[in-house]
Image (cartoon, grey):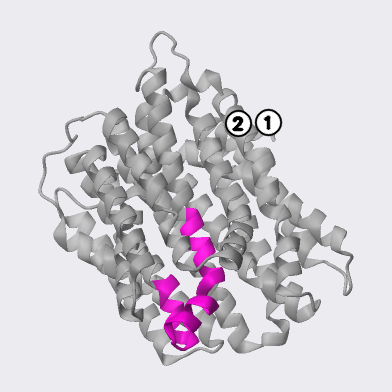
Amino acid sequence: MTTLFSNQPGDEGLPGQERARVMAAVMTTTLMGVFDGTMINIALPSMAKAMQVQANVSVWFANGYLLSAAMTLAIFAALAVRVGYRPVFLSGLTVFTLTSLGCAMASTPEMLIGMRIMQGIGGAATLSIAPAILRSVFPGRLLGRILGLHALLIASSSAIAPVLGGTVLDIMSWKWLFALNVLPGTVSLLLVFRSLPRKPASERTPFDTIGAVLSAILLGSMVLAANSASSDHHISVEAISWSLLAVLSAIAFIWQIRRVKHPLLPPVMFKNGRFTLAALTSLACFVSQGITFIALPFLFQSVYGYSPVVSALLFTPWPIGIVLIAPHAGRWADIFSAPLISTVGLALFVVGLILLATLPARPAAWDICLRSLWCGIGFGCFQSPNNREMLSNVSRDYASYASGVLSIVRTFGQCLGAAVMGALLAINELKAVHYALWIAVVASAASVVLSVSRLRKTGLAHTL
């Protein structure tokens, strides 16, 4: 850990001590965002009962955050290029912290949903540029290592959040799930205010308002389409309508960024084949993960008959596997080839998914845990090296855009995975899990093909 804050001649970024403060602020903010999303899902029944609303209304206590965050990811990534990381991150963190307090004080469902929507906007402002900030303050020689720690934080907090959320609900009101954000949010604000430098924006150009509106419609309609498909368990008119809107807005967005001089997302970034392949590889892998994350609870509860608590425990080895390998994978990516390491991770991930898809009719709990652990190890070996590959193959001026793309492909991939699973449930609920896991295998295998193709660009294909 101390090597992250040591200085060497020629290091770009910030000195070690200031680097540590910025890292602490970014990591704390990420931790709050992950905890907030995961713990709230557990609390929805309690919140619905306390607010005296139906379950379909309480779902928006979670979806309001996801929807507003998804709609504004690209906007904040582009805005940070024009005004700088500091004002965007400080504003987003301030909004997130204040609306956390607002959620805790909400007395009506409408007020809570409104606060959650605002909280999602604040969360998007911080999460969309967090990797870019880490790249700006750390030297390139440490980029894989710090991104590995970032992936470890996300995985470990995802594993801990359900247990912590359940503990909080056992001894306190659901309001404390939001109130607990206020103190770390305030500390993070002070750290960012003191340490993140005031750097001039790299571009003084007009903001692409039309592109921003189209990106918001595109990402928002994707989330709503996935939500409709996965919650209705049939192909509804609503799901089809949102999907159609997503397709039309995607076409319009691509047309817009290709025709304007200063687009919301510069197409020139994608002329770098290694960046584009890393983004597509990540997209395919997150589609696979999105399918699997929805399929496994159905498998454990509906097929094998485990309780929700036991199902959560059976899933825990997955994030544990990421925790075990992600920091090492990030360090290896700084020394060896990041594409090669992420390709190896993807191959392991495919094997793990095949193992899950071929589980026997009545497997032992330890057998399920080992196969889930294997998936986590493979995914952890892939994620941080691939993120490094994306961020290192654009200039520092484009780091914010690359960070936004990273967040967008993750969100889009998970939403598309959810939509696939929803469609399968609509067609045949009894066989949906079996089909879903094999589709996840195909999606992850496609990511391996994409990843191998970029090895040819780096001249490393012969090493596999």
Q: Residue at image x 36%, y 85%?
A: 241
Asked if one can make out residue 399 in the rendered structure from this viewpoint, the answer is: yes
Q: Residue at image x 63%, y 44%?
A: 380
**Magenta range:** 34-63
Q: Kindly identify which numbered label has been placed on residue 463.
A: 1
Q: Is residue 312 above or below residue 421?
A: above
Q: As drawn, is 207 to the left or to the right of 371?
A: left
Residue 290: give x, y in percent of width and height: 57, 64
> Residue 37 colored magenta?
yes
Q: Is residue 25 above or below residue 441?
A: above
Q: Quadrant of the N terminus?
A: top right
Say if mark 1 contacts mark 2, CB within 8 Å: yes
Question: Does dot 1 land on a helix, a strand or a loop?
Answer: helix
Residue 332: give x, y in percent of width and height: 62, 28
User: Circle 2 sits on which residue?
Assistant: 460
Q: Residue at image x 49%, y 25%?
A: 142
Magenta segment's dominant SS is helix
Q: In this orientation, which residue lies closer to the viewer: 127 or 110?
A: 110
Asked if one can make out residue 250 in the rendered structure from this viewpoint, the answer is: no
Check disc 1: other Cα within 10 Å, few if <14, some if 14-19, many if 20+.
few
